[in-house]
Amino acid sequence: MDKDHGRQDHDRQEREAQGRTMSRRRFLAICAGAVVLAGGGWVLSRTDLAERLAKHALGAAHGRPVLRDLRQVIASDNAHARTIMWQSDVKWSDAVVEYRRKGEKDVESSPAARESFTDDGVTVELYTARLCGLEAGQPYEYRIKADGQCDDWHALQTDDGGAFSALIFPDSQSNDYTDWKHLAQGAAEHNEGADFFINMGDLVDNGEDHRQWEAWFDAVAGIIDRIPVAPLMGNHETYNEDWKVREPVAYLHEFALPANGSEEFAGRYYSFDYGSAHFIALDTQTEEAADFHQGLLEAQQAWF
């Protein structure tokens, strides 16, 4: 009888444990459903959802906004301006970039424009702030402020008009971005004084695959938040997940590049100054663009 009672108690404990497990699973499923409804079609795994909920809770507990893929993007005039971008799962109406000369107390701010960006079945909130009126050749620091919470300070150095150095990378596309991460981080470590970096097309293997963009940004974390990126579009940015040509939707949203005077071809080609050099970035995907736009080559020739 004692053994029977022991088995019964053991069985009852197992059923209770299973019930608790199922309750947690139901809770995550309900949360996931709520996020899908609120986000207008977010597709998140339960693991992703749990991790993001945990990060937001941890960020709130420490008084910091939760953001990802923070980046500096090259500006037309890098002595006096810079573009700051980041992504979040949260819609903030009051997000700003605060900035100041390094070591000083006076803080200025620039409002961030928010855009809901959906690609590959995933929706994120994309924020863009443009800092203007900076002093040439000065060390700055900036941080994100939203919902009354502030992120850590990040370095920002303006162009002094003199000598400079840049990291220049060819294709980073891959089916495993571990090597890209090692390459980028190693190059940055051995060239700490680099002022910006260039990625010369085919940043990802498939332009629609959001996981590859996440891997690309993860690889340059700690670099792209302190020096600006000057990206170029390759043909792989124009592929959908069926390997058919499409508009480079993700690329055109992920980088708010200097204006080129064309609304139709905005973000496809651009130029910028650094030091005594003028850089011109062209879009050579004229065949890929032909199904959606006409005159890309001619527009660039006239602009050039």
Image (cartoon, rainbow, N blue to C red):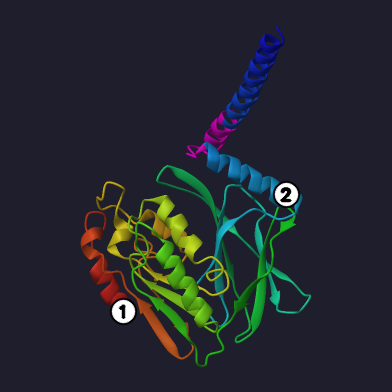
Quarter of the image with the C terminus in it: bottom left
Displayed quadrant of residue 150: bottom right
Up/down of 47 relative to 109, above or below: above
Work out whether residue 276 or residue 228 is closer to the camera in this orientation and state it. Answer: 228
* Residue 304, numbered label: 1
**Sequence order check, earlier mark of 1 and 2:** 2
Read off the magenta span.
29-45
Mark 2, Cα crowd under 10 Å, few <14 / some 14-19 / many 20+, is some
Please give the name of the residue rendered at 61% of the width and 47% of the height, measured from the top-left corner: 91
Residue 58 position in % (x across, y down): 70, 49
| 199 in relation to 80, above or below | above
* Spot occupied by residue 208 in the image (x, y as percentages of width and height): 36, 51
Q: Position of residue 80 (x, y in %)?
A: 58, 80
Any mark on residue 60, and which? Answer: 2
- Image side of residue 150 versus residue 79, left or right: right
Q: CA distance from mark 1 to mark 2?
A: 48 Å
